[in-house]
Amino acid sequence: MSNAGIIEKGKEKAYDGSDSGSEHSSGLGSIYQRPVGFRGVYSHPITQVCLMGFVCFMCPGLFNALNGLGGGGQFDASTSANSNTAVYATFAVTAFFAGSVNNKLGSKMTLQLGTLGYALYIASFLVFELQGSHTSPFAIAAGAMLGVCAGLLWTAQGSMMLSYPTEQQKGRFIGIFWSIFNLGGVIGAAVAAGLNWNATAGKVGWGTYTAFLVLTSIGAILPVFMLNPADIVRTDGTKIIAPRHPSWSVELKNLYVALATDPMILLLFPMFFTSNWFYTWQFDDFNGSIFTIRARGLNNVIYWMCQIFGSLSIGILLDSPRLTRRARAFLGWIILLIMVMAVHAWAYHYQRGYTRASVLDESTKFDIYSPGYVERLWLYIFCAFLDSMWQTTTYWMMGAMSNDPSKLAHFTGFCKLRSLLSWFAGAAGAWRADAVKIPFMNLFLSTWGLLVAGLVFSLPMIHLRVKNFTPLADEILVRMDDEGHIRPTEELQRETRTRQ
């Protein structure tokens, strides 16, 4: 039986080439019998998404935990900020072409390659802690290497996470992934907080970096145990359409075609851009500036824990069977707008009370027993809710545009172009702006304004592009042959019916 069959069987249907019918999984393929027993559990889409979540738990999750301490756990945030500038500069350049690399090498191999830079990045901070500030160029070079690897990892992750579920499951799958991924932040932050609970130096010790290095090394091994996407059968019986691995010239043409035939993705670019920008104010300019190292560690644990609840709650809402997909898209947009305005109006009240000069005095920092600590912790909790809801909804919107892993790989790469935009904006983006000591208030207001702008730009895309299901006619790359020619829907249907 061909993978490209276009038939209707069972309770749910695959592509039928029409624009009518209920919401369904639009994976191009026949209905397949799912494996049973251990093989059925191991090859289940949720199991594979969970494994991918643990990969990201060990690698980017711990990267987030380290950055969440403020300044990479150092007293002076300059080295961390410069290293992160290198991360996001090379990240963006790599991510633009990472979709093509993913479709050529396969998602599993691309994910494996993407894990390799995280241990190097953590090792560079361990060296910095042991050998001193003269090793900061190593941290910056490691950041640049990590950016290349991160571009590959997140592109492969986005392609798999958005193509494994049926259309009715995408919000839940995204929520499950982000919950496991953020467990890395929780555990990493808990380790750092425990090791530095009684520290007075204003920075973490070498033991923290050593623990993180061990965990990220384990994360680099985990992709070996994952299945290739072609071996996955969705819960509705359809198979993942594995990329054909065409020539590099055809794959680069696919990159152009994905953008040219679906330009509405451009309206999501401001949301992509902002989804990395706000970390600078949250991590360095709020948590890293006004709290003691013990309070920063506890805040970090709670921040990543709350991300789990935020991503799961918005994911369940975005999959609600009581509403059409278009209605869910607009509802998600409204919730994000309310969160952005409420959280930043609250944060503005606190930001007015301190500057870069005032936080240099350690005696002014909030410890866990200080008056006013709990109120500021609650703000940080709602920052975590906003972050996880923003990330989950952004991915869900991309998933609402396609079910084709090849196209989704390119879309995820476009998503990471937010980093390239961050690099050019303000000479080197938010991390660089923080490194050169731009006033806290300037970075805060830019964060608030960019979040609102991201929502404004995404609204026309939701209105014009999000449909209640994705028809085959919208999946251009599925219909492209190995020579780069796009076949009509009817021709592909006739061909696949002949093969049955």
Image (cartoon, rainbow, N blue to C red):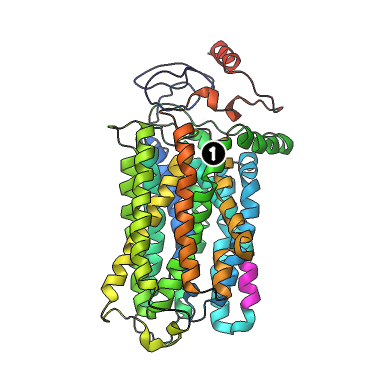
Asked if residue 384 is among those painted magenta in the image, a careful observer would answer no
Examine the rendering and report whether any part of residue 215 can be seen. Answer: no
Where's residue 451, x and y in %?
A: 45, 55
Segment colored magenta: 136-142
Q: Is residue 226 above or below residue 424?
A: above
Element marked by disc 1:
helix
Taking the view exactly as shown, the residue that stands out farthest to the right is 249
Quadrant of residue 340 within the rendered picture: bottom left
Q: Is residue 406 left or right of residue 43?
A: right
Where's residue 23, x and y in %?
A: 38, 26
Q: Is residue 113 left or right of residue 315?
A: right
Q: Residue at x 47, y 73 (%)?
A: 440
Examine the rendering and report whether any part of residue 420 can be seen. Answer: yes
Q: Is residue 326 left or right of residue 223?
A: left
Provide the residue designation for mark 1. 408
Q: Residue at x 48, y 32 (%)?
A: 464
Q: Residue at x 60, y 24 (%)?
A: 479
Quadrant of residue 473 within the rendered picture: top right
Asked if residue 140 is among those painted magenta in the image, a careful observer would answer yes
Question: Which amino acid type is marked by label 1?
Answer: Leu
Q: Which is nearer the eye, 413 or 53?
A: 413
Instruction: Determine crowd level at label 1: few under 14, some 14-19, many 20+ residues with C-alpha closer than 10 A.
Output: many
Where's residue 415, x and y in %?
A: 55, 48
- Count the marks: 1
Where's residue 134, x and y in %?
A: 64, 83
Q: Which secondary structure is most common in the magenta stretch?
A: helix
